[in-house]
Every structure is written in C-alpha cells, then in structure tokens.
Amino acid sequence: MQRRIQKSRFNFLINVSLVLASGLISLFLFDWVFIKYENTFLQSSSQDIQVLENETFDLASLGFKEKTVSASKTPNTIRILSIGDSFAYAAVPAPYTYSDVLESVLNQTEDDRNFEVINLGIPGISFPEYLAQFEFWSSRLDFDGVIFNFYTGNDLVDMEWLPYSKKEEIRFKNGEFHIGKGTWVPRLYPFRFLDYAKAYYSMYMPKVQEFLYSDSQTIKRASLFTWHHALSNNIIAGTENLKLPPFYIKAMRRASIAYRLNKAERTRNGYLWLLAVMELAQKTIESGKFALILNSPSNLAFSKNIQELISELEGIPEGTLDPHLPGAMVAVLAEMLQFKGGIIDPLDCLASYAEAGKELYFSNYSDTHWTREGNVIVGRILADHILKDWLKIERSEEFPVCPDVEGSPKKNRLGAEIALSTYKAWLTEQP
C-alpha cells in the first residue's frame, strides 16, 4: 500500500514536471514566432538601412522626425547627433522639438558656422539601443558632438529585466536596433508578447472601466460585480480633482520607482547601463568631439498633486518621494567615472518655470511628454551649455534660462552610497 502511494506521488510529480516543461517550451516557441512577426511587420531593422545614391539618408522615410541628411558635412558645419527615446523624438511636431530649437538657437549666433542637430530619437527604446544607435550612426554620419537623452520616468526601471554585463553591452553595440511602431511598446517582461499584451490592456481597459463606472451601469454593477467597490477605490481614489486618465496614473506610478530609495534594486540595472552610455560618451570626447547627457525628469517631479496621489496609491511614506534622487545618482556616478562631458540636469530650472505657471507638460494629461514650451526651454538650456562650455562663443542675447543647470544636484547621502555600490558592480564587469 505504501509503495503504491509513493509510486502515485512520483507519477504525479513527473506529470506536473512534464506539463510545466511543455508550457515553458511552448512559451519560448510562441515568443520566438512572435518576435519574428514583430520584426517582419511592426518594425524595421537597422541592417536594412542603406545610404542612397547621392550619399544621403532619408531619415523621415525611416521613421525619424527628421529631414534627409548627407553622410558627409562641410568643414564649416557643426553637426550634433541627438539620441534618445520618445522625449528626444518629442510629442510635438517639427520644428518644435528641443533638437529643432537647439539648432535654431545655435544658428542665431554671430558665429559664421552652420549648425545641424540631427534628431535620432526613437520612442520606446532605452540604454542598450542608445549604444546600438550611436555605434551605427557615428560610423555613417560625419559629426562633431552627441547628446544622449534619458527619461527618468521609465529608462532606469525598464532595464529591470535586462541585467547589465560587458558581454551584453558589446552585443548591443555590434548588433542592430529597430525603427517603427514596434519600438513604441516598451520592453518590460522576459517574453516580448507579454509587452504587447500589457500595451493592449493599457489601451483598451480604460474604455472598459469607463463603461463599468458609467451612471447607466450603476445598478447592474451593484448586483453583478460584488468586487466593484474595492476596484473603484483602487482606480479613482484621490483623482477627483486631477482627472487623470488611467494610463497616466500607471505611467506616474512607474515613474515613482526611480524617486524612491527603497526601490533602488529595481533601478540598479538601469544605472549600470547608464554607466555604459557614459563610458561611450567619454570615449567620444577623447576622440576630439563633445558629448552631453541630458537627464529628462518626469512630470511627477514637479506636480505636488500627482505626488500626493501616487504616494497614496503606492503607500509611499510622506517625504520619501525624492525627485532629486536620480540626478544625485547620476552626479555621483559621473564623478566616479571622471566623466569629462556635460551632465545636464534641468530639474530645478524646469521647476522654477513650472512654479511661474509655464505649461511644461500637457495640462490635459493626454501625454506624459514636454509641450512646445517645455521643448523650447530644454533646447535653450542645451544651447546655453554648448555655446558657453564647448564652443566658447559669446552670446549676443542672454537666454531666459536658469544658471548652473550643469551643477551637481544636492547629493542624497544614501543615494551616494547606492551609487558607489553600483559603480563597483559595473567595474567588475569591465575587462
């Protein structure tokens, strides 16, 4: 009898193991097929980008918010590559992106040179793709400098599922990047099809929720969905005054991770990848060019109302949401790396404009990116740094921007300690 029970248990464990193994293999196979589909129909590979007969690249046809550019440039032209995600790409049309503003302001100086700023922003990408982007375009376009933009709202936490290693860094540098609709879907999970599932859920669930919570459904809801009160409180508690759409709340909740010390482990990979970008920028500087790193903050950093709402939803203790934390981390990492380029942290500068009533982010909460006005301010901040600290050109007009945007932010002591351990972890990966 005992043997029969043991045999039955053994057979049960074998069957469960087979089911789990089959399920896991099926997931990998399905994801492999899905990635093939994505690469065929939803995005284009950099391997397919070809220079035209007249030695130009039609960037607009490739999905960039840019014009056709020649591979070479005249000696009288200073060309700057602008690399980043959707903040570099911008939620406003050309010529209102910060890259356009930067180019316009630089060309308004009395210097006799011509300035070009090439907007190579691709929505949905992050640090590994920044490396691939730069390796690709820097070998095909003559240039004098580069601006790497990263967004604290998601870039740091998006790397949670992609641990940094020197091997992975080299793989991305020597690999391909993609352009197209598929890049708009952020990489959050080990399986790519789950990223799309979440994207579609985020897109359509607000419509379902709006239907469920409409007045016409109140009576039906009360009798059919016994759980509706808890769900209602989770979704709309604290939003009566803000009127934030569900996608915006989700974006701000995710953005809050980078501003919380107790979530540092979730952003650790992001900072390791940032160090790889910073090292690449350092090598670019050593080759005789210039490089800037622009730290783009989330709207969460400026809106006290949004901070209070997200703190309530996430259970964040009062005073522990620190908008200066990412800037402090970056400043310490740059100091440890002895980075010679510029670190542009516009947080305090933008905060002064926000306090003055300027609309830096869309006030109707339809988008999490900068408005035209926000792009103008950031473009002028960049121009101010490039003219003063790199080109050493005297400005005929004082830009109405804040001073000391490159100054190291107030360094959070605990943040500095985390930055130190992160830097040591990065060093162990270096040859």
Image: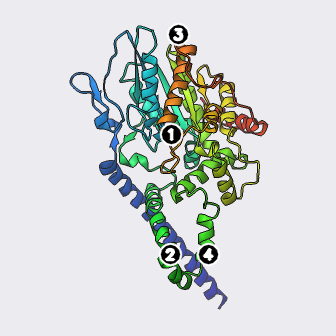
Residue flagged by tag 4: what amino acid is it?
His
Left or right of residue 220: residue 426: right
* Location of residue 418 in the rendering, given as x and y in whole percent from the top left corner: 73, 39
Corner quadrant of residue 179: top left
Q: Residue at x 61, y 42 (%)?
A: 269
Query: Do labels 3 and 2 touch, CB within 8 Å?
Result: no
Q: Residue at x 51, y 46 (%)?
A: 368
Q: 12 or 83: nearer the eye?
A: 83
Which residue lies under the disc numbered 4? 229
Visible in this render: residue 48? no
Corner quadrant of residue 423: top right
Judge depth for marks 3 and 2 and give the one in front. Answer: 2
Which residue lies under the disc numbered 3? 393
Q: Residue at x 64, y 43 (%)?
A: 301
Which residue lies under the disc numbered 1? 370
Which residue lies under the disc numbered 2? 215
